[in-house]
Image (tube, rainbow, N blue to C red):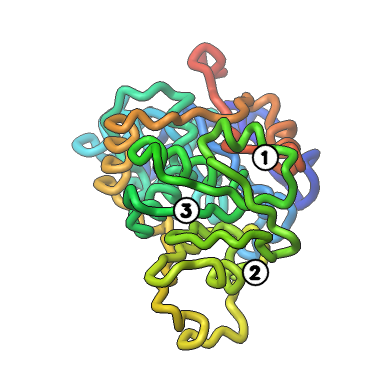
Amino acid sequence: MKAVVVRKAGDSNVLELIQVDKPQVKSGWSLVKAMGFGINRSEIFTRQGLSPSVTFPRILGIECVGVIEETTDEQRLPVGQKIISIMGEMGRDFDGSYAEYVPLPNEQIYPISTQLDWATLATIPETYYTAFGAYQNLKITSRDTVLVRAGASGIGTAFVKLVKAKFPDVNVYASVRNTAKKAQLLDAGYDDLVIDDNGVLKTDVTFTKILELVGPATIKDSLGHLQENGIICSCGQLGRKWYLEEFDPIMELKNNVYLTTFYSGNVSQDKIQKMLAYIEKEQVDVRPERVFDLDSIQAAHDYLDSVAAFGKVIVLNKEENFSDK
């Protein structure tokens, strides 16, 4: 089969598309034909050698959508079953989804029932699952005024689509470092932009709900723009700062505000199916910003790691292109 192997840390040139043996199924695992997957910034970090627990060589990829090719659980995971797989140690402790076939532990495979096409499904897993969890934890209502910090990110654009599908009149602002992507952001569903100047929001507007995707680097500043009884959900670390320092919760949250998170490792088949049902019922405008194939994996990484990056980037494996056909 075709697979993208990383033998050493480095830039996108270390992503080698080669032929490798199709994986053998072992007890408690099944083999998935990967129809598509999203590219995630964590995979870029891993490729760069910034994931200390990951050893090379490794096939990256922390999520995938596809069908069961070979199974060791015929009742729950019959051959041909549509599935989503996210989280766990795929692409980190064991080889991941940057391939035509992916061996996965059965407990990390979630059978799904949906009529969504593969391009839509490949856009959803890690990004929309996180955005939907944050949407629920923020308890969005029709009366809210919402800010998405790092609005041009994949999770940010997924979140605004989830909100606008059900609450089209809610004002949702995107924080950005400049206005170069204004047209794209407005097209994605945002109502206006707020400039983020080195971690400081340049606005007098206050918000009832804030999705914090920059993370610990800007949480304190975000709290200063939150109305009383408002909620911040912090579930991103794009600021590359992992911990809150010198944080006095009594004083920082003194205006009767709430700080929460959503951990995408809190995953189950029921939660995934609930998200898919919401997307279908509310007719959420799920679409990838850019679509690549395995042959273009280096270009996919370069795009996501560039200033031009916007929204969700995916890779699709077309049925006719599988090397065993």
Whole-angstrom CA distance, mark 2 to mark 3, is 19 Å
* Dot 3 or dot 1, earlier in sequence: 1
- SS at mark 2 in the image: loop
Depth-wise, is mark 2 or mark 3 nearer the camera?
Answer: 3
Relative depth, front residue between 286 and 62: 286
Quadrant (top left/top right/bottom left/bottom right) for the N terminus: top right
Q: Is residue 308 left or right of residue 262?
A: right
Residue wearing tag 3: 146
Q: Nearer the viewer, mark 1 or mark 2?
A: 2
Mark 2 highlights which residue? 217
> Which residue appears at 27% of the width and 31% of the height?
281
Q: Residue at x 80, y 39 (%)?
A: 13
Q: Residues within 10 Å of mark 2 (few under 14, many from 20)?
A: many
Give the CA separation, mark 3 to mark 1. 41 Å
Mark 1 and mark 2 lie on one chain; the one further toward the N terminus is 1
Left or right: 106, with 15 as reference point? left
Say which amino acid is labelled 1: Val
Single out the residue that lies furthest toward the left.
75
* x and y percentages locating residue 124 in the rendered image: 44, 37
